[in-house]
Image (spheres, rainbow, N blue to C red):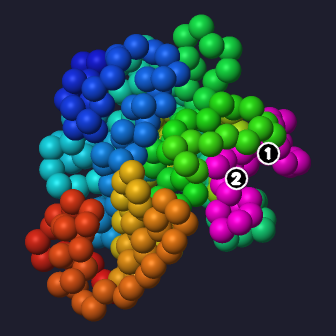
Amino acid sequence: MSDSDAFDLGDYLAHIGWEGERRPDTQTLRGVHLAHMRGIPFENLDALRRTAPSLELPDLAAKLLHSPRGGYCYEQNTLLAAALRALGFGVTLLTARVVVGTDRIESRPRTHMALLVEVPGDPQPYLADVGFGAIGALLEPVPLRVGAEFEDAGRRHRLVRVPHRGPLDLLVLQAYVGGSWQPQYAFTLEPFEHVDFDVINWHIATNPRSPFTQRLFVQRVTTDRHLLLHGRLLTETRADGAVSERELADEGEVRRVLDEEFGIEAPEGMKLLG
């Protein structure tokens, strides 16, 4: 089954609130990417229950577009990839090693999904990613150009090349956070397929050592703030850089905040805190 057979582009664009042109150019790419980031929250509720979410397009549409839920990187970027292909872009699936909090790139497995997007008539491909659940995430795609600094909807990113043992260039996405450049994830341009992510998705959602099976992790981006709920810690980062934190009291308050602040309805009876 092709993406077009299983995917309703109009449904998707209406959900994320995109009313611009439906043509494969850089303006549409940036606009749809940003609208997706603001329109669909990041969450790991399925993995917290040690259940691997389906990555089939009808199931993704039912969950991310037609229910009060969100998803994590494999769900989010699979959905975006289908939308971009329907709009006429070329899309290649990539894997990345998340390197936030580590000095050794090789210490992390390739478990993150990102997208390489080709715009017809433009020799410069773009890195797109609506599934990175961190303050350093891309809000808009950035050109695949090493060394240049890019501003995407108020955030700052750059790509750097780092030495490694493999035959392909290893690139690291860096974000300017807290006054310095911080590495987010490392990747090569080796193409991966949907079936590869079926395996990675199952591992991340069911392995008891996976961070996503151990603690609640939810993110939402709006025009003026970034909200992150990690366990019971709620962190708000304003557009001007101001940060505030508060600890939620109990399961009841966590469930209420999920509903009111993130637009997410947790399954009835699900335990949200360890």
Q: Is residue 82 above or below residue 249?
A: above
Kindly identify the residue that appears in the image at 35 percent across and 47 percent down: 38
The residue under the point 57% across, 42% down is 152
Mark 1 and mark 2 lie on one chain; the one further toward the N terminus is: 1
Q: Which mark is residue 250?
A: none
- When the figure is inspected, residue 48 is found, relative to residue 162, above or below; the finding is below
Pointer 2 residue: 174
Please name the residue that numbered disc 1 is placed on.
160
Q: Which residue is the extreme one toward the front?
A: 240
Quadrant assignment, res 171: top right
**What is the residue that sits farthest to the bottom in this orientation?**
249
Magenta region: 156-183
Neighbours of disc 2 within 10 Å: few (<14), some (14-19), many (20+):
many
Quarter of the image where the N terminus is located: top left
Q: Secondary structure at mark 1?
A: strand
Q: Quadrant of the C terminus?
A: bottom left
Q: Amino acid at mark 2?
A: Gln
Say which element carries label 2: strand
* Residue nearer the viewer, 256 or 168: 256
Q: Give amino acid for label 1.
A: Val
Q: Measuring 43% from the left and 82% from the top, which residue is drawn there?
A: 245
Q: Are marks 1 and 2 in contact (CB under 8 Å)?
A: yes
Q: Main secondary structure of the magenta part?
A: strand
Q: Position of residue 119 (x, y in %)?
A: 55, 17
Q: Is residue 243 left or right of residue 22?
A: right
| Residue 50 sits in quarter | bottom left
